[in-house]
Amino acid sequence: MMSRRTIGSIEALVIGLAVLSYGCAGVSSRPGQTLSPAESAIREEGRWFSASNIQACLLLGAAAGGLCALLGGNAAQCALSAVAACGIGVGVNQYLQAKRQKYASQEQFLQALIGDVNKENQHAATLLTNTHR
């Protein structure tokens, strides 16, 4: 089991990274200047590394790692769970960002999400029905 000091250090690191990512998200290297085509291409390729992705990663990673530590997992297990949760957080954030861009209003976006959830629930129900046969 991890000591309280180790858990406190991990929490401080995560909070520090979250504050740093939030602070760096809005920083522009050359405010008011246009980017060259090469710079624009590089920026577009790196768009997945957005502040919301970083925040989703940190939030879920910290939650999973902290929960693992509280439940008495060893450092390797907790690190692995934090990394896996980080990946899940980024994936969910990307999904939500892509959905948001498709719809003009919040209501259309939420209706689309509800439709996706209903579709997945139906799929899960079909799988469960087929397994019990």
Image: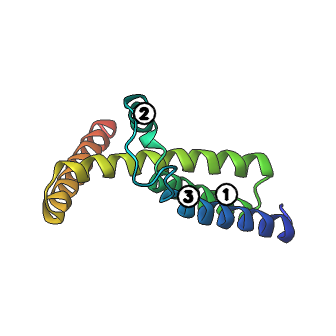
Characterize the local packing of mark 1: few (<14), some (14-19) or many (20 or more) Cα atoms within 10 angstroms: many
- Could you tell me which residue is drawn at 44 percent across and 54 percent down? 31
Identify the residue under disc 2. 45
The amino acid on which the numbered mark 3 sits, given as a three-letter code, is Cys
* SS at badge 1: helix
Q: Nearer the viewer, mark 2 or mark 1?
A: 2
Whole-percent x, y for residue 55 in the image: 51, 58
**Residue linked to disc 1:** 65
Lower position in the chain sequence, tag 2 or tag 1: 2
How far across and how far down the image is residue 23, in percent?
56, 64
Tag 2: residue type?
Glu
74 with respect to 41 (left or right): right
Q: Residue at x 37, y 43 (%)?
A: 34
Other-residue count near label 2 (Cα within 10 Å), few / some / many at <14 / 14–19 / ≥20: few
> From the viewer's perspective, is residue 45 above or below residue 116?
above
Label 2 – label 1 distance at C-alpha: 29 Å
In the image, is 73 to the left or to the right of 59?
right
Q: Which mark is residue 24?
A: 3
Closest to the observer: 47 or 99? 47
Closer-to-camera residue (129/102): 102
